[in-house]
Structure formats: structure tokens, C-alpha cells
Image: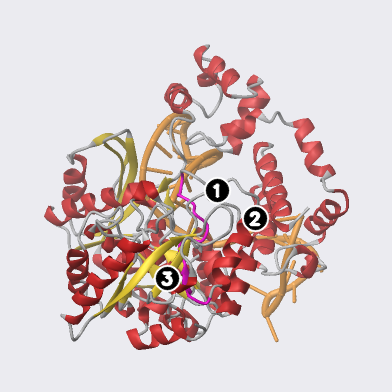
Amino acid sequence: MNKKDIIKTLEQIAVYLEIKGENAFRVSAYRKAAQALERDEGTIEEIGDPSKLKGIGKGTASIIEELMEKGESSFLNELKEEIPSGLITLLALPSMGGKKIAKLYQELGVEDAATLRKACEEKKVQALAGFGAKTEEKILAALDDFGKRPDRLPLSLVMPVAEEVTRRLNEFSDINRFELAGSFRRGRETVKDLDFIISTDKPDQVSEQIGLMDNIKQIVGQGETKISLELEFEENLIVPVDFRMVRDEAFATTLHHFTGSKDHNVLMRQRAKENKEKISEYGVESAESGEVTTFTDEPAFFAHFGLPYIPPEVREGYDELETKEADLTLVEQGDIRSDLHMHTTWSDGAQSIREMVEANRERGYTHMAITDHSKFLRVANGLSVERLKRQHEEVRKLNEEFSDFTIFTGIEMDILPDGTLDYDDDILKDIDFVIASIHSGFNQKEDTIMKRLETALRNPHVAMIAHPTGRLIGRRDGYPVDIDRLIDLAKETETILELNANPNRLDLTSEHLKKAQEAGAKVAINTDAHRIDMLDHMPVGVKAARRGWLKKENVVNTWDAETLIAYVNKNR
DNA sequence: GCCGTTTTCGGCCCGACTGTTTTCAGTCG
């Protein structure tokens, strides 16, 4: 059993105990033990004695040891004997938690979705103490929706919704300021909902305007400080959106609270407790005087606890509170001076070279690369050698028009299924910025894929590997890659790895990026734009980079053109 | 179940909302 399996098992035990109606703190102890393992960077073997980690004591350590010896947990096996597995899936129903499920199981013999439905239809549920007719109706409605909707929505789908809601809020009256919080602000690649924090002196009026918005499928909840909606857009795109209304003095702490993550908030509150203080969304309360301190902005809030500003992207409850300011100074959009991966009408892009160049200049960059597909990719009108040469002639001519801007010739060259590259070295040697990438043979075994990648990495003309895992978020997993090996090779051969800024891709992940930075491999953030408007995905990529704790100096797009080309040409 | 410069017991992050109650438990974020 590896570390991931052990973490999963501990979390599974927590779920079973929850349904058993166990003490909530005992349940969370198993979750905390799982988190402690996750937080530690070592493998399970490197950790050695697990009980030396904070959050793992005698009980959970013995379970971990048993898992390592036997590959299974007798405790979990007992729980599985005792509790029908169908109950586990019921936890996914909204407003259903361990306590309610335990009661349904114990008093009505509910074992799964089907028996729960039957109990509701026979009106047995509303007879239980603590349940009622409304609860029964809600359960039936939830069962009807069960499994129809994905748990989390990919960023690419919710981004336009976030923009649309932002546009509408800007038109509302009685709003001092507002900001989008939650996992969207933290830059996660999928989100459960959108959380808007609104500063207002008239929450009733704001709530009323929100309730009259277009596209409302239903109002899920409405209180004095909060209104929760489901907005429905085309193609069955249903996005839950929460709005929290607060007075302006509480805006910073509310924003922090609802930006999360939950684990980060727990760390902050524990820290406050050590100071005899209590954090809530309304401010920081002194336990002694009961006085509440509020803050003008988040930096002031963190400063109150002697902390540097912790960017939203790293608020995941790991070690961000223990990290020194220098390591929290992450790459930002303003640092980006180039986009190094994009397409034109020469292959499968929508715009001409000139149009793409102008669009890049408008975005304030100082250089760029035109990188159309290579000849293997016929469906994308990949460039023959002859067309490649003609295109590069055009790029060079265009480049002469600008004294303050540099256009690199480039190519996104396929790494072929047989492991060879799509062009010979004597073609590649004349190209400024050669990207290599995989668009075929996704079903190959990991070592075959790695051999293909290694060929590209070891070629002195290849500057960068694009979208190194090939995944499409929520649609396909990509091809199998040994990331650690890829990073080591990238470092050794001084080949750049791409963080693809397209919200459907976003490979590398934050874990990959952390490893790359630690290993000393360089990263590029590129939009891979096929249209001008896709160039605007750059901030999405920057956010993803910040989730990977990337510093400016390790992101090659922040370098000037001379430094970049010197790095690329070093080994040629 | 875990933890301790408030230490071996008694806490464990905090508040809003809903639906059930008639003062609060459960769920959620």
C-alpha cells in the first residue's frame, strides 16, 4: 500500500464512523491523520514512525502500520460488515449528513437510495423525531437529481458565469464594493460554487435585486446576510452562487473567511486562539475584553497576527502560516513579458500572424513566439517543411517592423507515436523556439510515453515540452507520465516545461509545479491560443502558477527576450 | 481519536440557515 492508499483508507474510516453517528471529534481525528500524511512530503517509508507526525497518535498509527503490513485494515473491515455500503453514497445528498443517515438506518432500516426513496414514499421519514414533511420532500427531490449533476464544475465552464454575475453586480445600487471569494479566488481548477462577498449598508435592497436576477433556476436559501441561488445557463449548465452581504468594516474578514480554504481558516483560528482571540467573518474578537477589531484589507488582517500577506492561491492549510515572506512572493500577471505558444491560420488557429502579433503587443508583452502545428498533425493543417520555411520567412519580415518587440519563429512539433520527432535536426536548428508535444498514442504504456518524451527532452533544439500530461479537465485524463522523472530530465537537459494556461488543460498541476520549482526546472506559462481572445487566458495560468508557489525567476515568460533566447540556445 | 508553557482530562474553529421545534440539532462552508 502506498501513501495515497493509506490516506484514502483513513478517510474511508472517517466516513463510516460518521454514518455510525460517532463522536464528531473522533471522526475528524481520522481525517486529520489523513491530512497529516498528505502534508508530509515524504513517502510512507521515508516517514517511518507515523505517530511522530502531529495529528497521528497511537490509534491511527496502528491502523497505518497494519495497512503497510497486511494491505488492509481490520477496523475498516469490521465497519464494512456493520454498515451497508449503500449508505455511504447517501452522504452525497444535499443536507444529508452522518447523523440523519444513522437515524434513517437505525429506525427505518434504510440501506441505500432505493430503500430511502421507499421510506419517503411511504411517509415513514416524516414520522421520525427531528424529521418532517418538508425534509421528506427535499430528500425525494434530491434523490431525483441524484447523480445528474457533477460535484464540481471545471473552471472553463464557470468563468463566463463569474464574469456575467460580476457585470450584473456592477449595475446594482447600494453596493459599496464586492469581490469573488471561494475556491475560484484561490484558483482551483474546479469549483463547487461561486461566492460573492458584498459590502453594503442595505442588505435587504441588495438581496432583493439579486433575487430578481435573470437565469435563476431556484433560490436555495435566503437570510439576513446571505442569499443562495442556482443560476441556469445554456446546455444544462447550473451553477450554484452564494452572495454574502456585510457592512464595509467586516468586508476584509468576511472575504478572508469565505476565500478559505476551510483548512487554512482552521489554522488561522488556532493561531488566534493562542493569542486569546477569536476570528469570525465579522472581525477578530479579544476573549478578555470582547472587543472586536476590524481591518481595512486582508494584508492588515494578516499583519495583526504577525504574518506576511498570504496570497489566496496558497491558502490550503499546509505550511503557509510558517512560510517566510520571500517564499510567498509569487509570480504575478504584471511580471509576464511574453506568450510563447500560439497558433495562426497557418495551422488550426483563427487569426493571421500579424493579428496575433498585434494582439500580443496590445497586451503589453515585449516578445512572443508563433508556434503552429507540425506536419504530423494533418487534422490541424500541420506545416510541411516547405510551408514552415515560408511561414518563418514571413515572421522574420514582420519582426523587422518592430524595434521594441521581438517575434520568435517557432513550431509546436509532434513527438510521433514511434518516439521519433516530426522534423530533422537540420530543420530544427534554424527555429528560434521549438516546442515538442504529444497529440497521439495516449493509450501507450508509461515507459513508452516516457521514452517519447525523453527523446524530445534530449534533443538540443527542443526548448520546451508543451502541455506535458495532455489532460483535459473533466473530460480526459491524459497519457501516463512519470512526473518526477520528467522533471528530473527537464532539469538535466535544461528544457522548459509548460504550464498550459487554457482553463481546460492547466497541466502541470500545482503539485507538479512545486516539484519542478524545487528540482530547479524552469516553467513557461503559455496560452496555446488558437484565437485572439484566448490570449486572455494568461491570468488563469498565472493563478495556477501561484497555486504551485512559483516565483518570478523560475517562470521564463518573466525574462526578457535576450535572457530567454540565451537559455534556449545554451546547449544547441 | 489527539493533544498539552492553561498537560493526562476536557477541550477540539465559527457562524448562518433550515426545519424542526418552542430552544435547538443538523448541515454547510
Specify whether residue A215 is in view. Answer: yes
Reading the image, the residue beneath label 3 is: A427
Which of disc 1 and disc 3 is earlier in sequence? 3
Which of disc 3 and disc 2 is earlier in sequence? 3
Question: Residue A42 vs residue A65: left or right?
Answer: left
User: Taking B23 as reference, is A244 above or below it?
Assistant: below
User: Taking A339 as reference, is A540 above or below it?
Assistant: above
Q: Give me the residue at 64% from left, 67% from top.
A: A484
User: Taking A198 as reference, is A543 above or below it?
Assistant: below
Q: CA distance from mark 2 to mark 3?
A: 25 Å
Amino acid bearing label 3: Ile
Amino acid bearing label 1: Gly
Q: Extreme top residue here?
A: A122
Mark 2 secondary-structure assignment: helix
Quadrant of the rendered image containing residue A106: top right
Is residue A117 inside the magenta stretch?
Answer: no
Q: Nearer the viewer, residue A545 or A227?
A: A545
